Every structure is written in structure tokens, then in C-alpha cells.
């Protein structure tokens, strides 16, 4: 026994060096590009290359320029408006639908959600034209509501699926006893089950809020006027033209998006991970 | 009053009448009203829209085939909803009639009718908004793509100056037979497969490796490493990709200037600047590496969860039997990971198969040109995007390609989901 333990310890010391070497090298590979973007955001505007710099003349000027000289502030506001409505409506819709899928038997229950999950895998690229024409017919080109509806609908199958899973974790006995006490469907839903899944509703809400910040494709195609851009489309204009790249502005603009999103992500991380793993070990 | 058996469903050929016959005046009025609205809609717009979907218009400039097709598709969806209501109405009349026969109580008055909506109609009421939104945002584009793939819609045949025509499987034939498209298709498809396999396998390999390494119990600063390894997942990917596109800039990017500069300090190493963005081969290398960077945290998190659920006794027993570390990994750890995570891994493969933003935002699918408007690093999905949005759009070819991709992705996913019972709704 003692021998085995000694062997194990030997193995550990031998193993520790490559282990830590691997972890440190991987950490550098991850941090290095992130630091480049962060440090570029504080460089003077004559900097045109994307390098990690340790120079001392750091400046906050780029952040001021973003709001003074570019439409960045407008883009940010646009994105928040779209994200806000996406969050409110999508959360409402998927909470209702998830509850129904968890608690009721009804015609088409088994097939319908799977049907939508499958149809959703058809890429929308080729149908962009269809959305464009629809937007034209409805006079909705450059209008946020149209884009918002697309964001809401696209996320429904997967989010409903997840919400159903959360509702499943609330014991059915609660519903049953409430029903015996004479509570109607609405009361059971509103007063008994809903309060118990509040944390998960918050997670879903924040997830749907983050969605429009990350989308490039739809907004690029349906928002034609630069005052209507979202941040993803707007940021790209800083670096898309090789002759007039504004890498420092791009970096500064990126930070203002990435920092809040990262904070949200790390705040919610344990829920993401929990959902992922429980879903995984269940199957 | 003696009622005739089974008459109600026949009366419901005109919705509402069967309900009246059953004595449900309130429900009957609502059904009849809905029916009238539907008939009016069909008479005023519906029927002509559906006919136009078949003919796609007859007079150039006056009839815009594209608009007709899109309106027709919308109408088709609306009509299906009508038909579903119609069927439901007949089923309802028949069910209620049976209840009456058995002497059960049925909702009669307005109050009772409203109550029954909150009761047996509750699931339908709550899921309707979700269904309507999904019909418009998911089913509608998929149907339009399906229809478009069988027309001759392209920049040479563009409404309203030209009418669109149904051309059967012609687009699919040109994809596989026509020399120009066939060559491009094979090149792009080949690279799509290589890209999917390499990038995804890299991210899975890195993820598993990192999880296994970090999960050893003697490691210090686990939390710090954990946070660092989550960063690529936390940062919005379009920002990372655009940043990498700057970092890999041929002349001024950090990759050539700093990283290679540093490596060249090592005695005996001398690497000339690499044409990351101007040589297709190097762009391919770059995007595979970057995807590994972007995608491994997800796998790492998943695998960490699985590792922590493997009972320690297994390893202890193996140690007793004198198993080496490698043997333990091969016979315990790896099979456990695969058993739980393989459906997630497959989703990663299908995700990368359609990973538009990586290809498009890094280098626009370029450099170079492999014909048919596709760049040297374009995968099918970004080629489709270019076919739809480029200066000489080929919409119907793009739609046909989309269908092809969809068939591939959906069949793979279905096999996996079926195997893992992920969609077992009763579970």
C-alpha cells in the first residue's frame, strides 16, 4: 500500500511539470489575442496594426471618438431596443409554451415541437430574399419590429425545449394538490409553478437578450441604412474597408460590447453548465 | 328531444352548425364567425394567391412572380391553419355529440364556454403564440426555399421584367452535371467536409484534453484556469473572429509580427512571414486553428461535468489491478465521455458544417476564386450567401444547395437524436 502511494506521488511530481506547462501555454494562447484587442482600444488613432503593446501613452480618446465621430452610440441604442423587445416577447412566449409541453397532453404534442426543431435546421440564407420581399410588402425594411419578430421566432423551438425541461423539475404533486383545492389552470400556473422556475426564466431572458448582439447575418441584410445598424454590423464597417481601417475604434467598440456580455455570461455560467450536464447525463 | 346519432359531425361541414345541434350556442357562434372570416379571406385574397403560386403570373412587369410566390407561400400556410381548424371543428362536434349521448355535462352558456377554454383549451391557448411565430419565422422561409429551388430565379431571369417558371429538378441537375457548377460544387463541398472534420475534431480534442488535465485533484488555481478557459465562449464570437482577422493580417498583424518574430528568436528557427489572408491554404489553416480556440470551451465544460460524475471507485479498482494512467483513460474515461457526450459532439459537427460567421467574417470566404462566385475558403453555406447577395445572384441554385445541406444535416441529426432518445417527449 505504502509502495503504491509512493508510486502515485512519484507519478504526480513527474506529471505536474507537463500538466502545468500545458495549462499555462493554453492560457497564454487564450489571453494573448484578447489582450491585443483590449490594449488596442487604448492606443492613439495613428495605430493601424493589431499588436500587443505595452507603451505608456494609453488614452481613452477612442471611446470618446466612438460616440462623437461615429454612429456607434446609435447602433448600441438600436441593438438594445431590439434585444429588449426580443427578450420580453420571447420569454413570455416560451414560458407559456414550455409549461404546456411539460404539463399537458394535447393533440400534436409529440410531433409539433420536433417538427419545428427539424425545420429550423434548414438554413435561412436562401430565404433571405423572401424575408426581404416580405419586409418590402409590409413596408418593414429598416424597421426593428420585423427583425425582432425574426429573432423571437428563430429561438423558440430550442428555448421552449429547455423551458419544458425546467418545468419538468417542478413536482407534479404541487399541481395535483392545488387542483384538489379547486385552483384553476391559470392560478396553478401563475401562483404555484411559475414562482418555482423564476431563476430559469431569468436565465432564458438573459440568453435571448444576448442573441441580437451576436447576430450579423439578418441585421446586415434587413437593415440598409447605417443609422439603423446594430452593433455587429456597425463594428464591421470599421475594419471592412482595407484602405481605411480603424482598428483602434473597432477594438474600443468591441470592448463595450464584450465586457457586459462576458459579465452576464460568467454570472449565468453555472446555469449554462448545469443545464448542459444534466441534459447530457440524462440522455 | 330525441337527437339523431352521429348527425353533428356531418352538420359541422359548415362549422358551428354541429355545435348548435349539440346545444352549444356560444361555441357555435364563435365557430361560425371564424368560418365566415376564413371564407371571406379565401374568396378575396386566398384563392387567387394560391392560383398565382401555381402559375407564377402571366404578364411580365404586371405580375411580379417573386411577390406572387411569396404571397402564395404565406397563403398556403394560412390555408393549412384553416384546414386544421376545420378538422378540429368536426372532431369537436363528434366528441361532444358522444358526450351528450352518454349524458355527460357539456359547456352550454357563454360563461361555461369561456371556462372550458381555460380548462381543456388551456394548452392550445398558451402555445398558440409560439406556433404562430414559428410558422412565420421558421416554416415560411423553409417553404420559400423549397419552392425557389424548383424555379429559374436568378439575375438573368429577374422579376418583374421576367416571369419565373417552374423548372422541376433542373437546378439540381446543373449542380451535379453542368461543368462550371459541378466543378465549384465539388471543390466547395470537399473543403466543407475537410473543414468540418478538422475544426470540430480539433475543438473536441482540445476540450477533452483540457478537461482531463484540469480535473486532476492536485492542481492549484483551478478556478483561475477555469475562468480563462471559458473566455472564448463568453466573448461574442463575431468580435473574436473580426479581431483574429486583424491579428492574422499579412503585413501588420500580431501573428506575423509578434508571434513569428518571437519564434524566430529561437536559434535555428527562421520562419518568413506567412500569407495568412492571401494564400487560401494558410487561411484554411488559420480558420481551423481559430475554430479550435473558439469551440473548445464548450466541450471542456461538458466533459468536466461528465468526469465529475464518474465514480471514483472505478479508478480505484483499476489502480488495484495495476492499470496505467493511459489504460485508465482508454478503458474508463474515454468510453464514459463518448457515451454521454457523443450527441453533443455530433451537434458540434453539424454546427461547423454551417458555420457561416467563421468563414465569412474572417476573410470573406476568400482569398481566391474557385468559380461560381465562391472564394477559396468558402464552405457551402457561405457560398449560398454569396449566391444570394452577390452582384450576379443565382437564387434558385442557392435554394437547391440549401435543400441539399438541409437533407444532410437533418438526416444526421435525426439518426443521432433517435439513437439517444433525446426527443422522447414522454421521458
Image: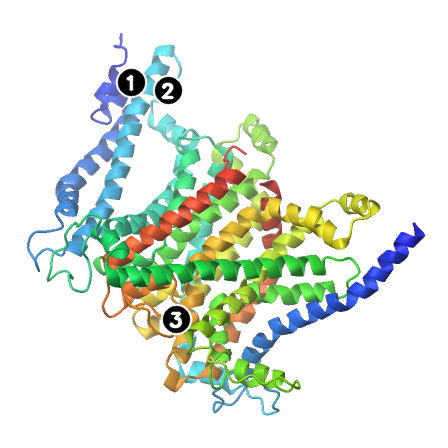
Q: Label 2: how many residues lie within 10 Å, few (<14), some (14-19) or many (20+)?
A: some
Q: Residue at x 56, y 32 (%)?
A: A175
Location of mark 2 (residue): B106
Location of mark 3 (residue): A233
Most extreme residue toward the left, as rendered?
Answer: B59
Front: mark 1 or 3: 3
> Could you tell me if residue B28 is visible in this image?
yes
Find out whether the residues at labels 1 and 2 contact each other: C-beta distance under 8 Å.
yes
Q: Label 1: how many residues lie within 10 Å, few (<14), some (14-19) or many (20+)?
A: many
Label 3 residue SS: helix
Q: Is residue B21 above or below residue A201?
A: above
- Which quadrant would the C terminus of chain B be assigned to in this image? top right
Q: Label 3: how many residues lie within 10 Å, few (<14), some (14-19) or many (20+)?
A: many
- Which quadrant would the N terminus of chain B be assigned to in this image? top left
Q: Position of residue B167 (x, y in %)?
A: 17, 50
Label 2 residue SS: loop
Q: Position of residue A195 (x, y in %)?
A: 57, 44
Q: Residue at x 29, y 70 (%)?
A: A224
- Which corner quadrant of the image does residue B376 belong to? bottom left
- Whole-angstrom CA distance, mark 1 to mark 3, is 59 Å
Which residue is at the front of the view, A181 or A155? A155
Which residue is at the front of the view, A52 or B251? B251
Location of mark 1 (residue): B22
Front: mark 2 or 3: 3
Q: Do marks 2 and 3 share a chain? A: no
- Whole-angstrom CA distance, mark 1 to mark 2, is 9 Å
Amino acid at each position: 500500500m505504502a509502495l503504491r502511494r509512493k508510486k502515485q506521488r512519484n507519478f504526480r511530481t513527474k506529471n505536474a511539470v507537463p500538466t502545468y506547462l500545458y495549462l499555462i501555454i493554453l492560457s497564454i494562447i487564450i489571453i494573448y489575442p484578447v489582450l491585443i484587442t483590449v490594449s488596442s482600444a487604448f492606443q492613439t488613432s495613428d495605430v493601424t496594426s493589431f499588436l500587443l503593446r505595452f507603451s505608456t501613452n494609453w488614452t481613452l480618446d477612442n471611446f470618446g471618438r466612438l460616440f462623437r465621430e461615429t454612429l456607434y452610440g446609435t447602433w448600441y441604442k438600436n441593438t438594445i431596443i431590439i434585444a429588449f423587445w426580443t427578450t420580453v416577447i420571447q420569454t413570455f412566449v416560451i414560458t407559456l409554451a414550455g409549461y404546456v409541453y411539460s404539463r399537458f397532453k394535447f393533440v400534436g404534442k409529440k410531433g409539433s415541437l420536433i417538427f419545428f426543431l427539424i425545420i429550423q435546421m434548414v438554413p435561412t440564407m436562401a430565404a433571405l430574399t423572401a424575408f426581404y420581399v416580405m419586409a418590402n410588402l409590409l413596408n418593414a425594411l429598416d424597421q426593428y419590429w420585423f427583425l425582432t419578430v425574426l429573432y423571437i421566432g428563430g429561438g423558440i423551438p430550442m428555448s421552449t425545449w429547455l423551458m419544458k425541461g425546467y418545468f419538468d423539475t417542478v413536482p407534479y404533486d404541487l399541481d395535483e394538490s392545488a387542483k384538489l383545492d379547486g385552483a384553476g389552470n391559470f392560478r396553478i400556473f401563475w401562483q404555484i409553478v411559475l414562482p418555482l422556475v423564476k431563476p430559469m426564466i431569468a436565465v432564458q431572458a438573459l440568453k435571448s437578450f444576448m442573441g441580437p448582439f451576436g447576430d450579423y447575418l439578418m441585421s446586415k441584410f434587413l437593415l440598409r441604412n447605417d443609422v439603423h445598424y446594430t452593433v455587429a454590423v456597425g463594428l464591421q464597417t470599421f475594419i471592412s474597408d482595407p484602405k481605411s481601417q480603424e482598428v483602434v475604434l473597432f477594438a474600443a467598440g468591441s470592448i463595450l460590447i464584450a465586457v457586459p456580455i462576458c459579465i452576464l455570461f460568467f454570472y449565468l455560467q453555472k446555469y449554462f453548465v448545469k443545464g448542459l450536464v444534466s441534459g447530457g447525463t440524462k440522455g | 328531444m330525441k337527437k339523431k346519432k352521429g348527425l353533428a359531425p356531418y352538420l359541422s361541414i359548415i362549422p358551428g352548425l354541429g355545435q348548435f345541434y349539440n346545444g352549444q350556442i356560444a361555441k357555435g357562434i364563435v365557430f361560425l364567425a371564424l368560418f365566415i372570416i376564413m371564407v371571406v379571406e379565401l374568396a378575396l385574397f386566398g384563392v387567387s394567391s394560391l392560383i398565382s403560386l401555381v402559375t407564377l403570373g402571366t404578364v411580365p412587369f404586371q405580375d411580379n412572380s417573386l411577390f406572387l410566390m411569396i404571397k402564395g407561400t404565406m397563403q398556403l400556410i394560412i390555408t393549412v391553419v384553416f384546414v386544421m381548424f376545420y378538422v378540429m371543428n368536426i372532431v369537436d362536434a363528434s366528441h361532444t355529440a358522444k358526450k351528450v349521448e352518454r349524458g355527460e355535462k357539456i359547456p352550454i352558456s357563454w360563461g361555461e364556454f369561456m371556462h372550458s377554454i381555460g380548462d381543456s383549451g388551456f394548452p392550445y391557448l398558451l402555445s398558440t403564440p409560439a406556433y404562430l411565430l414559428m410558422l412565420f419565422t421558421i416554416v415560411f422561409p423553409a417553404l420559400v426555399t423549397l419552392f425557389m429551388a424548383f424555379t429559374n430565379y436568378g439575375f438573368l431571369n429577374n422579376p418583374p421584367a421576367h416571369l419565373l417558371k417552374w423548372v422541376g429538378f433542373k437546378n439540381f441537375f446543373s449542380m451535379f452535371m453542368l461543368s462550371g457548377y459541378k466543378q465549384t460544387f465539388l471543390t466547395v463541398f470537399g473543403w466543407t467536409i475537410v473543414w468540418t472534420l478538422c475544426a470540430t475534431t480539433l475543438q473536441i480534442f482540445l476540450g477533452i484534453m483540457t478537461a482531463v488535465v484540469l480535473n486532476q485533484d492536485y492542481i492549484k488555481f483551478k478556478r483561475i484556469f477555469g475562468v480563462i478557459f471559458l473566455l472564448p465562449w463568453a466573448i461574442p464570437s463575431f468580435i473574436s473572429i473580426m479581431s483574429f482577422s486583424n491579428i492574422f493580417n499579412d503585413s501588420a498583424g500580431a501573428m506575423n509580427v509578434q508571434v513569428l518574430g518571437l519564434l524566430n528568436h529561437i536559434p535555428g528557427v527562421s520562419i518568413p512571414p506567412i500569407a495568412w489572408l492571401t494564400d487560401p491554404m494558410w487561411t484554411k489553416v488559420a480558420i481551423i486553428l481559430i475554430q479550435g480556440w473558439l469551440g473548445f470551451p464548450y466541450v471542456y465544460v461538458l466533459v468536466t461535468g461528465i468526469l465529475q460524475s464518474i465514480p471514483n471507485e472505478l479508478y480505484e479498482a483499476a489502480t488495484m489491478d495495476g492499470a496505467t494512467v493511459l489504460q485508465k483513460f482508454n478503458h474508463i474515461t474515454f468510453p464514459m465521455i463518448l457515451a454521454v457526450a457523443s450527441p453533443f459532439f455530433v451537434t458540434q459537427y453539424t454546427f461547423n458544417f454551417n458555420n457561416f460567421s467563421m468563414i465569412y467574417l474572417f476573410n470573406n470566404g476568400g482569398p481566391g476564386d474557385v468559380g461560381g462566385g465562391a472564394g477559396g475558403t468558402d464552405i457551402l453555406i457561405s457560398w449560398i450567401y454569396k449566391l444570394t447577395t452577390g452582384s450576379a445572384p443565382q437564387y434558385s441554385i442557392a435554394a437547391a444547395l440549401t435543400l441539399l445541406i438541409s437533407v444532410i444535416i437533418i438526416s444526421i441529426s435525426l439518426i443521432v437524436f433517435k439513437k439517444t432518445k433525446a426527443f422522447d417527449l414522454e421521458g
